[in-house]
Amino acid sequence: ENKSNKTMKTQILAILFLFLISNSLLAQEKVKDFSLPAVGDEKPFVLSEAKGKYVALHFLLKTECPYCIRHTNDYVEKTAGLKDVIQVFIKPDTDEEILSWAENLDEDSFTIYRDVDAQLADELGVPGGYSFHNQLVHYPALILIGPDGKEVYRYIGKKNSDRLSVKKFMAVLEGLRK
């Protein structure tokens, strides 16, 4: 009996080890190129055109969302000086809904992009199932893609108000640049 316990422990350790390896390999995979349509008459965002820069994908919630407004205003205002980072704000709503939502933003010097049917959120593994305004939506998230096109950081909020602050984002960026 003792021998079978040892064997089982060895198997569990081997499985854990494989899981950890596969997880770290996954994190190193390049994010598949994608294109997001812009709201209004701006040109779409294409990941491959951002080569050599960090790309912060901000997955904002569907429908009316004051936290999304605050989050977007904060990042636009406080990260404007970062020449090596592109902030990409993404909503899964229709053009009309996004345009009406965007009227509450402080500035209009940047573009909001559409993730039609939250397809990109699904592809990048942003969890769904968050109940918000009587709809099931994806959780708020920030995914940071490095200059080499690989995902380097992700933050998934547990609820609408749970966002990565600009201060924490800057600290993450600082750590990655070293």
Image (tube, grey):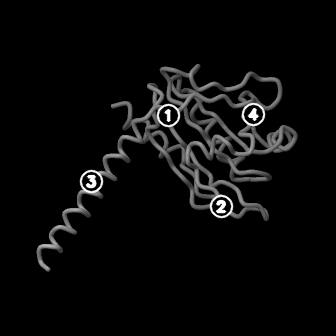
Q: Earlier in the sequence, mark 1 or mark 4?
A: 4
- How far apart are the two marked residues, 3 and 4, measured between alpha carbons? 48 Å
Query: Viewer-proximal residue, 21 or 72?
Result: 21
Q: Report the amino acid beneath label 2.
A: Gly
Q: Earlier in the sequence, mark 2 or mark 4?
A: 4
Task: Give SS at disc 3.
Answer: helix
Q: Report the amino acid beneath label 3.
A: Phe
Mark carried by residue 129: 2
Q: Earlier in the sequence, mark 1 or mark 3?
A: 3
- Binning the other alpha carbons within 10 Å of mark 3 as few (below 14), some (14 to 19) or many (20 upward) gives few
Task: Give SS at disc 2.
Answer: loop
- Disc 2 or disc 4, which is closer to the eye? 2
Mark carried by residue 145: 1
The quadrant of the image that shows the N terminus is: bottom left
- Binning the other alpha carbons within 10 Å of mark 2 as few (below 14), some (14 to 19) or many (20 upward) gives few
- How far apart are the two marked residues, 1 and 4, measured between alpha carbons? 25 Å
Give x and y (percent) for residue 90. Answer: 68, 40
Left or right: 69 as drawn, with respect to 124? right
Give x and y (percent) for residue 153. Answer: 45, 42
Left or right: 176 as drawn, with respect to 2? right
Q: Report the amino acid beneath label 1.
A: Ile
- How far apart are the two marked residues, 2 and 3, measured between alpha carbons? 30 Å
Quickly name the residue at label 4.
107
